[in-house]
Image (spheres, grey):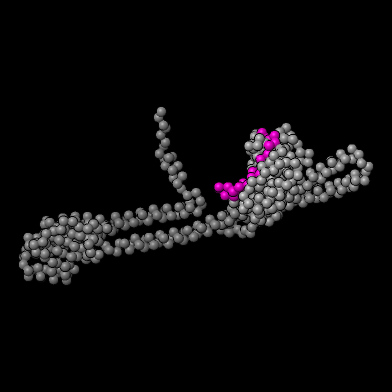
């Protein structure tokens, strides 16, 4: 079977996308640094190709011409007196040091220079100007170039300053270019970091608000970021106003309903005992419980402060209610396991899950453990009838009742799971349902680290 060939442009861009930075800071830095780096490479290449190498070529040609003139002048009169005059003149006018090594031969090898282009240029210039065998070394001495030419009397050794061969100040240009690049990149990093920090603080404020926390936040940064921050603050104020209005409304309704319910309770307490009176008392107790549930759901315990709590102690306190209801509870938790939560709200959410399990099962297992990815996980298992998997999300619907799947709790109003999930999400976590190994329902509470 022949595999389809991927178009190379699409594959190329897909590979770049996978390897590119994912953070805004990394991408912004790449947008600035990459063009600067490409520009610096282009400028450096043009400098070396069009300027530095051209200058070096002229310098090496000049040195090769001087060396050729010295060799030719010596070969015309190879006497010691002529060599002395030639050496003095070359030292004064050409800045060359000339020595005759009688009976010597040319070296076989030489030390490689850091600048190969200089060696190539000097070799070409000497080859064009000198017919005799020669040898040179540009790397042995830091400030000099050693050129040796074979003559009948031995080897004519010529020492020339290195600036006669190549532009020794060329590296200064590269140094300044690199220093400027580092300086500008550092300034760019500071500015980008300042702008990204404003976005990060906006994200932190939004995340804290989602968890029910109230942190001080002031818009800053670029104009667009400040505009987004002001929009967030306005949205937060509207949501708080809505929540406060809803809480106040339900609190008022609860207060207004409690007055006639209190009068009814007094009337029933003074009435003659009987089956109808007991039934009415049961209905009245259920109405009071429903009002408490509505108010708890609306309030959400959002104003409570976050504290570090001992999870095992909290779970054991919650499990006592299930034990009193007749269920057998097994708690498995690390005694050192802690979590930062709003104690009353989280205790109420966990109690809803445990009491929900006690209402539909006889055996309950509660386990708490630390997660490998960070945070904690609390698992509540029961051996009740369970809920069909396709109705797990429906079970979290406020006021939802799954009567055909589980026995109806006569005091329940369908808010237990909704309150538990609302509290967990208010802490940045979640509550999910699954099939329990005990045969019933498993409720999993996950909290972030």
The residue at the point 36 percent across, 54 percent down is 41
Give 215 or 273, whichever is nearer the viewer: 273
Please state the horizontal and vertical placement of residue 322, each as a whole percent of the image: 73, 44
Give 61 or 205, whichever is nearer the viewer: 205
The quarter holding residue 282 reads top right
The quarter in which the N terminus is drawn is top left
Residue most toward the top?
A: 1
Please state the horizontal and vertical placement of residue 73, each as a whole percent of the image: 9, 64
Q: Is residue 124 above or below residue 358?
A: below
Q: Is residue 114 above or below residue 405?
A: below
The quarter holding residue 104 reads bottom left
Would residue 181 be visible to someone looking at this image? Answer: yes
The residue at the point 73 percent across, 44 percent down is 323
On the rendered structure, is 39 left or right of 230?
Answer: left
Q: Is residue 238 above or below residue 162?
A: above
The residue at the point 43 percent across, 55 percent down is 33
The quarter holding residue 173 reads bottom left
The residue at the point 92 percent across, 41 percent down is 273
Please state the horizontal and vertical placement of residue 351, each as a whole percent of the image: 71, 46
Would residue 339 be visible to someone looking at this image? Answer: no
- Asked if the stretch drawn in magenta spans residue 381, the answer is yes
**In the image, which residues are magenta?**
366-388
On the rendered structure, is 94 left or right of 321?
Answer: left
Residue most toward the right?
A: 272
């Amino acid at each position: 079977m022949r595999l389809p060939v991927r178009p190379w442009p699409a594959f190329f861009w897909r590979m770049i996308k996978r390897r590119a930075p994912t953070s805004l800071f990394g991408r912004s830095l790449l947008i600035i640094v990459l063009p600067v780096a490409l520009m610096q490479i282009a400028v450096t290449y043009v400098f070396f190709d069009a300027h530095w190498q051209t200058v070096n070529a002229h310098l090496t040609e000049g040195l090769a011409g001087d060396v050729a003139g010295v060799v030719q002048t010596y070969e015309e009169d190879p006497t010691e007196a002529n060599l002395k005059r030639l050496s003095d003149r070359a030292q004064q006018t050409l800045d060359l040091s000339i020595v005759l090594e009688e009976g010597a031969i040319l070296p076989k090898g030489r030390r490689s220079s850091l600048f190969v282009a200089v060696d190539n240029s000097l070799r070409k210039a000497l080859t064009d100007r000198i017919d005799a065998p020669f040898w040179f070394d540009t790397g042995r001495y830091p400030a000099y170039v050693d050129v040796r030419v074979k003559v009948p009397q031995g080897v004519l050794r010529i020492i020339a300053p290195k600036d006669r061969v190549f532009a020794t100040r060329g590296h200064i240009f590269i140094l300044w270019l690199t220093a400027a690049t580092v300086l500008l990149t550092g300034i760019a990093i500071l500015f980008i970091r300042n702008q990204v920090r404003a976005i990060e603080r906006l994200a932190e404020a939004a995340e804290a608000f989602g968890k029910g926390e109230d942190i001080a936040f002031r818009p800053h940064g670029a104009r667009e970021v400040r505009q987004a921050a002001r929009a967030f603050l306005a949205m937060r104020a509207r949501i708080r106003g809505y929540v406060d209005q809803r809480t106040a409304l339900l609190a008022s309704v609860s207060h207004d309903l409690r007055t006639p319910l209190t009068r009814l309770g007094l009337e029933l307490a003074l009435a003659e005992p009987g089956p109808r009176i007991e039934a009415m008392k049961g209905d009245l107790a259920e109405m009071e419980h429903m009002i408490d549930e509505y108010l708890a759901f609306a309030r959400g315990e959002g104003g409570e402060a976050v504290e570090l709590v001992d999870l095992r102690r909290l779970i054991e306190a919650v499990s006592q209610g299930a034990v009193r209801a007749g269920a057998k509870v097994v708690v498995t938790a690390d005694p050192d396991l802690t979590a930062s939560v709003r104690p009353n709200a989280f205790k109420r959410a966990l109690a809803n899950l445990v009491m929900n399990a006690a209402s539909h099962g006889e055996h309950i297992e509660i386990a708490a453990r630390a997660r490998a990815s960070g945070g904690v996980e609390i698992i509540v298992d029961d051996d009740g009838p369970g809920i069909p998997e396709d109705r797990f999300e429906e079970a979290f619907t406020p006021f939802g009742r799954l009567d055909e799947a589980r026995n109806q709790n006569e005091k329940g109003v369908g808010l237990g799971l909704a309150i538990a999930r609302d509290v967990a999400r208010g802490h940045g976590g979640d509550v999910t349902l699954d099939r329990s190994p005990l045969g019933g329902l498993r409720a999993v509470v996950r909290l972030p680290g």
